[in-house]
Amino acid sequence: MKYLTTLTLILLSLTLNAKTNEQVETKYSYKGYPYKMLIARSDSIKILFTEKQDRVNCAVQFEQGNIIHKTSYSDVKKLDFNNQPLVSCLPRHQAKAWLKDTFE
C-alpha cells in the first residue's frame, strides 16, 4: 500500500508538471529604435507564431504594468522572421505607439 501511494503521488506530480510546461523559444531582436526601448520598458514581450514551410504566421503580445497590447496575426517570410523576429511581426508604427503608451 505504501508503494502504491508513493507511485500515485509521483505520477500525479509528473502529470501536473507536464500540463503546466509551455513550449518557449527565446528569440533575439533587432536593437534599433523603437524596439530596443520597447523591450527595455516592458515586463514581457511574446512573439506568438506558427511556422509553415517558407512562411510564419505571427503576432506580438506586449505587457507593462496594467498595459496589455496584442497585434493581429500576420504572415511573414520565414527568412525575415529568422533574421528579425520582432521587427517582422511588429510594424514600426505600432511599436512606436506602444512605446508612447509606456510614458503616459
Image: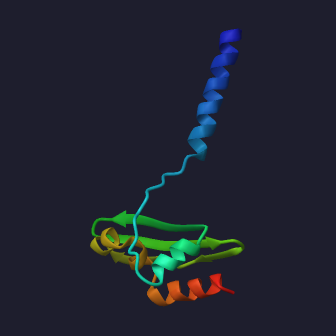
Task: Give the position of the N terminus as an image quadrant.
Answer: top right
Instruction: Pick the residue in front: 52 or 42.
Output: 42
Where is residue 103? Give x, y as percent. 65, 85
Tell me if residue 3 comes above or below residue 95 in the rendering: above
Tell me if residue 50 comes above or below residue 5 in the rendering: below
Where is residue 55? Give x, y as percent. 32, 71
- With 97 as the anchor, is 31 left or right in this view? left
Instruction: Pick the residue in front: 39 or 88.
Output: 39
Quadrant position of residue 84: bottom left
Task: Give the position of the C terminus as an image quadrant.
Answer: bottom right
What is the image's colouring? rainbow
Q: Residue at x 44, y 72 (%)?
A: 58
Instruction: Pick the residue in front: 2 or 34.
Output: 34
Tell me if residue 8 comes above or below residue 79 in the rendering: above
Where is residue 24? Give x, y as percent. 48, 54
Q: Residue at x 40, y 65 (%)?
A: 28
Q: Residue at x 58, y 74 (%)?
A: 41
Residue farthest top in this picture: 1
- With 33 as the anchor, is 69 left or right in this view? right
- With 67 as the anchor, is 38 left or right in this view? left
Quadrant position of residue 100: bottom right
Where is residue 68? Give x, y as percent. 65, 75
Quadrant position of residue 50: bottom left
- With 25 as the anchor, is 18 left or right in this view? right
How many numbered circles are shown?
A: 0
